[in-house]
Image (cartoon, rainbow, N blue to C red):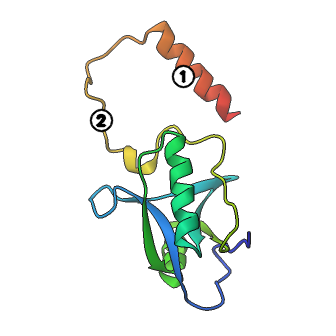
Amino acid sequence: MGNKQGTKNVTTPMRVFVLLFNARTENEGIHTVRVGDRNQVLMFESEDDASRFALMLEAQDFPPATVEPMDSEEIEEFCESAGYDWELVPDGALALPPESNVDQTDWQVDQKPADDDVDEITDSDLDSIRRKLEGLL
């Protein structure tokens, strides 16, 4: 896969496909992968490849993603303004989602738990939190 990051441009504008969560809602978010300490947007040359990647994400318990066609320049401009990198995934390249995912996405931050009055954390909750934190190491 060619690595196009925030300071490099794809040579000519082209139609690419990206994955959106909650498409066309107030809570819309673009799918990114974490590379080191940076977020990276994947721009797929092929709609079929983007759809396959979205299905693999769903198999990892992500919510369904919408494959959206966009202009590569528009995505690059968004990435530059958000401080993200981008990567162009060539047609036919097998892109695989990372084995680990972030526990809370940026578009989930505004969602509050249904029961805000819970003061006690059970042992099983603590074990779950501990496993998640260990997974970050």
Is residue 122 depicted above or below 99 in this figure? above
**Disc 2 residue crowd, few under 14, some 14–19, many 20+, Cα 10 Å:** few
Which corner quadrant holds the C terminus? top right
Residue that protrudes farthest toward the bottom in the picture: 12
User: Of marks 2 and 1, which one's residue comes earlier in the chain?
Assistant: 2
Residue 45: quarter of image: bottom right
Task: Name the residue type under label 2.
Answer: Lys
Q: Residue at x 58, y 71 (%)?
A: 44
Which corner quadrant holds the N terminus? bottom right
Residue at the disc numbered 2? 112
Instruction: Please indicate, yes or no, whether residue 83 appears anywhere in the rendered image.
Output: no
Residue 90: quarter of image: bottom right
Instruction: Please indicate, yes or no, whether residue 59 appears anywhere in the rendered image.
Output: yes
Is residue 131 depicted above or below 79 in this figure? above
Q: CA distance from mark 2 to mark 1?
A: 18 Å
Asked whether the beta carbons under mark 2 and mark 1 sit within 8 Å of each other, the answer is: no
Q: Residue at x 30, y 16 (%)?
A: 118
How many numbered badges does the structure rendering display? 2
Comparing 118 with 13, the one in front is 13
Does residue 87 appear to the left or right of 48 in the view shown? right
Q: Residue at x 39, y 50 (%)?
A: 107
Res 98 label:
none
* Residue 34 placement (x, y as % from top left): 63, 53
Does residue 57 appear to the left or right of 89 in the view shown? left
Task: Name the residue type under label 1.
Answer: Ile
Secondary structure under badge 2?
Answer: loop
Res 129 label:
1
